[in-house]
Image (cartoon, grey):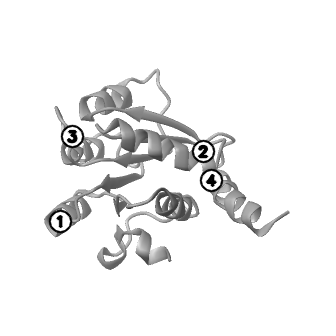
Amino acid sequence: MSDLAIRIDRPLLLFLALIGKRHPRVLMVDDDADDRELFIAAVRDIAPTIEVSTCRNGLELMRALHDESIALPDVIFLDLNMPFKSGQECLEEIRSAARLKSLPVVIYSTSTNMDHVNQTYAQGADYYLAKPDSFGDLKLITSKLFEMDWDTHRQPQKDKFFLSARLFK
């Protein structure tokens, strides 16, 4: 097996082992169709058996999360700037609902405004991920996030909360 195959398989194997599921579920919430499609393609490239669902805005997200007939995702990637209900409003609602409050939430935004970073940290987001500039960087940082132990590793100290691709290069 090539080195490349080992690197691509490792995030999936770790993610599967960490959450104890055969087909982990990721929910990506973004009003930009291109960003949703790129995210799905990146996850498929690094871990093809991870199930990725999407919502187009915060209202769709909260309807899906409150629908008890729908299985909860294992991780949510949440854009901040969306119509109808912002990512920050969704995060606040998620953290205040008993059924949802322990869901890992990664803020996934083009904004690198430190006010946004600080607010989402205070609201209990698990990480803040600046949207990468390239598909390769998206795959790199997504694979690193899937290597994290989501069962034991929740919100890090503030200096490790904000993630960007350059941290992993």
> What mark, if any, has residue 113 been given in the picture?
1
Disc 2 and disc 1: Cα gap in Å?
A: 30 Å
Q: Is residue 158 left or right of residue 16?
A: left
Tell me the quadrant of the picture where the N terminus can be found: bottom right
Residue under circle 3?
A: 82
As shown in the figure, which amino acid type bears the numbered disc 2? Arg
Specify the farthest residue to the top. 69
Disc 3 and disc 1: Cα gap in Å?
A: 16 Å
Residue under circle 4?
A: 46
Secondary structure type for disc 2: helix
Pick the front one: 50 or 164: 164
Could you classify mark 1 by the number of other residues whose Cα lies within 10 Å: few (under 14), some (14-19), or many (20 or more)? few
Disc 3 and disc 4: Cα gap in Å?
A: 27 Å
Relative to 99, residue 126 above or below: below
As shown in the figure, which amino acid type bears the numbered disc 4? Ile
Q: Quadrant of residue 33?
A: top left
As shown in the figure, which amino acid type bears the numbered disc 1? Asn
Q: Earlier in the sequence, mark 4 or mark 1?
A: 4
Q: Earlier in the sequence, mark 2 or mark 1?
A: 2
Disc 4 and disc 1: Cα gap in Å?
A: 29 Å
Secondary structure type for disc 1: loop
Disc 4 and disc 2: Cα gap in Å?
A: 6 Å
Q: Indicate the position of residue 20 as horizontal and vertical percent values.
A: 66, 48
- Whether residues under marks 4 and 2 lie with C-beta atoms below 8 angstroms apart, the answer is yes
Could you classify mark 3 by the number of other residues whose Cα lies within 10 Å: few (under 14), some (14-19), or many (20 or more)? some
Pick the front one: 97 or 3: 3
Pick the front one: 74 or 28: 28
Q: Indicate the position of residue 113 as horizontal and vertical percent values.
A: 17, 65
Secondary structure type for disc 3: loop
Residue under circle 2?
A: 44
As shown in the figure, which amino acid type bears the numbered disc 3? Met
Q: Indicate the position of residue 19 as horizontal and vertical percent values.
A: 60, 51
